[in-house]
Amino acid sequence: MKTADPELMRAINRFHVLDTIRRYGPLARVEICERTELSATTVSAITASLLDDGLIESQNLGDVRNGARGRPRVMLALRAQAAFVVGVKVSRYRIHLAVTDFQGDVLADLGLPVRLSREPLNVLAYLIEDGVRSCVSKAGLTIGQITSLCVALPGVVEYGTGRVRASPLIDELDAQLSDAMVERLGVPTYVENDANAVAQAEYWFGDAREFEDFALVSLENAIGLAVMHEGQLFRGALGLSPNLGDLVMSGPNGAGPTRLSELAEQDAIISGSADADCLRESARNGKGAAKVAERIARGDGGLLSSANEAGAALGVAIANIVTMLAPPRILLVGSTLALGNEVLEKLHATFESAISPAMRGVAEITVHMPGDDVWARGAAALALRELYGAPWSTTGPARHSIRNGIQGETDGKH
Amino acid sequence: MKTADPELMRAINRFHVLDTIRRYGPLARVEICERTELSATTVSAITASLLDDGLIESQNLGDVRNGARGRPRVMLALRAQAAFVVGVKVSRYRIHLAVTDFQGDVLADLGLPVRLSREPLNVLAYLIEDGVRSCVSKAGLTIGQITSLCVALPGVVEYGTGRVRASPLIDELDAQLSDAMVERLGVPTYVENDANAVAQAEYWFGDAREFEDFALVSLENAIGLAVMHEGQLFRGALGLSPNLGDLVMSGPNGAGPTRLSELAEQDAIISGSADADCLRESARNGKGAAKVAERIARGDGGLLSSANEAGAALGVAIANIVTMLAPPRILLVGSTLALGNEVLEKLHATFESAISPAMRGVAEITVHMPGDDVWARGAAALALRELYGAPWSTTGPARHSIRNGIQGETDGKH
DNA sequence: CTTTTTTAATAACGATAGCGGATTAAATGC
DNA sequence: GCATTTAATCCGCTATCGTTATTAAAAAAG
């Protein structure tokens, strides 16, 4: 446990103020007082220090309140240029990158069509390096200006060490992606599960802004799970994030266990159709929903049954998540949801029949379909989160040591 | 989020000191300094305040070090009489109670043979009240001296509100057990899932003393799950604790889903035998292992197959827990483990074949068989934990308001 | 155009926390 | 009996926060 001293106290309140400014846009000091319940003096001192460090700046251009009687408020906002980070989302058919500033605003993004399946680590690292360089340059920056980088990809990832224990996109086991990227780009790199990245995006920018506690299930060519608990991502030993696709749906009998991924991955659904290749192509272009609906209407029984099977498996899996974690909310995201309503309808129906009566009504299930850019932005947000430097331990032990530098104009004294 | 001020600082360090004394037995101030990394001055001040409040006391009877050179150490220990609490474990065939002092030492315990199955709330509340009164009197105390009470039982429990949403032992849904006990005994009452109680016992007194992160699966007539995360029990919405028995093991087809409880509950295993009633009786007396082994050796095929089925189901369930939460350790506890090795062997084998290769070796599985008294003590420990008053939020929102009074001799000034 | 009013932000002051170094306390060793 | 050693406390310092007064900068009133 950490012992409390004045320094920690300051760190907590400082983070609290910074986070409040991030969440609630430009704020006057008085407003920060109200939201944080700190005294005006303390807020004054802390904001002075933040200004001094170049993390925030005052927007002199006016008090927007109309009918303003007293001294006008000076609005404070994050100083966008305080740092720049890159978020990368790697998926099977696409690498999406986003360069953001300190506020998480996207300066440039880039989607690279690829076709990845169990590539050697070096291939992946090369593609990411290439993408980062392009995107950074597109944003009008140089690599030297990038403070840190976060790569999100499906699979079992150790956030703490930067290793990818297993991923459908990487050939090897235990690939040290973090070190590979540091070597190539010279930029501190975090590696995270893609579900965690999109959960962070939803929490900072999206639908889950008001929710400190929720679970998120990501449905793409891999199936992921993120658990946000009191505003922090839940991580296991070594910072491990779960890979929901590995969930065993029916006991190992003979040929081994049937996993959720085999039933509900996007490819598994599409493979049910006789015309799988064509559908795969459409799905990649975001026209999956229409195509799938059309096929089913035309009587593609294989597709219909695989969609139903996927929906049922997901319904059970989500019921089990609710049984085990009782999150007040479940978010479903990912491109598989664009395949049409069959999956989702079956999912809901199965969930309702599978959930125990005692847990009925505990978790509200909502669906959201963020674009790939949001995922990349989420990865960037994870990198930023580290920069904001919350003083309490990020969930999960054994962190990889990453320098926590922020480039400010006066990054001097203290 | 809580804002940090000197008061919080003190509360944190105070709890830290108190918890250190609780964990590591009588300690001299110097030793507290080493363990907490607080300065000698601070420890002196905090211990003075704790002494003043009657929460700890100095053991003047000597410095046990031999070859002691300088001024002898004054050992500090929890003052046992600072508070008394009662822990209750309710299970199908037994209500076990323990009265403990402020250190968690058991002053008296009591096991009442019962036979509960879906009783009305009042029956249960009556039995608990009766047991509490007996046990308290056996400890030489009066109800008025009891600071608080914690009832642990299987099922879906809202720790935050004191409601039992569902339990195999209670007839109704959403039974307000906490209020019922307060009304009967006039003692603040916490209600908790039994798995959480035994997890707290293992964390404070037992095998999990060194582990801040682990998951525990309790195997009795109900199957429970507790997740300890950074020394805190993980709780969901409203403080909900999971009921692992509700886990769906195979999709809802026709007659509804097959749940883990149907496959792996103690009764389910025993019911496989032709001679179930006799076995049930033996299991109740702790002679299950021998009897079951004997029956299987004699060729009770039904029993063997139900044991294997249970082991397999549990192996899959535990693999799924590891997949979702990646705990560094899994503890198995509960009387079902006394039914012989068939279940456990099958469990391990199935786990190994069900766990995804990427997660292999993440979680170490260990088995422990605490007696009913340990569970009751764990419930008491949960009540004590609240008294120790950690300043940071107990996991999970929406607490039931319970007065946090401690009876000290000088419970005055501050 | 000056004065009053109103609100925002800061300054001055006091309280409390923790820490480091000097001091006292209480034992052993010579 | 006195030096030595170790434990615990006392004193002085700094950093934090909060409360109360003060200054700053605008609109409204006269």
Image (cartoon, coloured by chain):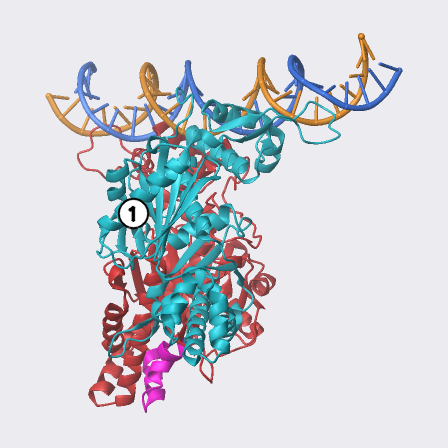
Chain colours: A cyan, B red, C orange, D blue
Q: Residue furthest front?
A: A278
At 39% from the left edge and 70% from the top edge, which residue is drawn? A270
Question: Is C3 placed above or below D20 here?
Answer: above
- Magenta segment's dominant SS is helix
Give the answer, above or below, for where A99 lies relative to B92. Answer: above
Residue assigned mark 1 = A127
Quarter that holds the C terminus of chain A? top left
Quadrant (top left/top right/bottom left/bottom right) for the N terminus of chain A: top left
Residue B145 part of the magenta-drawn span: no
Q: Residue at x 41, y 34 (%)?
A: A84
* SS category of the residue bearing label 1: helix
Q: What segment is highlighted magenta in the picture?
A: B261-284
Position of residue A213 measured from the top left corner of the image (x, y, whole percent): 49, 53
- Residue B83 visible in this rendered orientation of the protein: no
Q: Nearer the viewer, residue B94 or B217?
A: B217
Q: Quadrant of residue A224?
A: bottom left
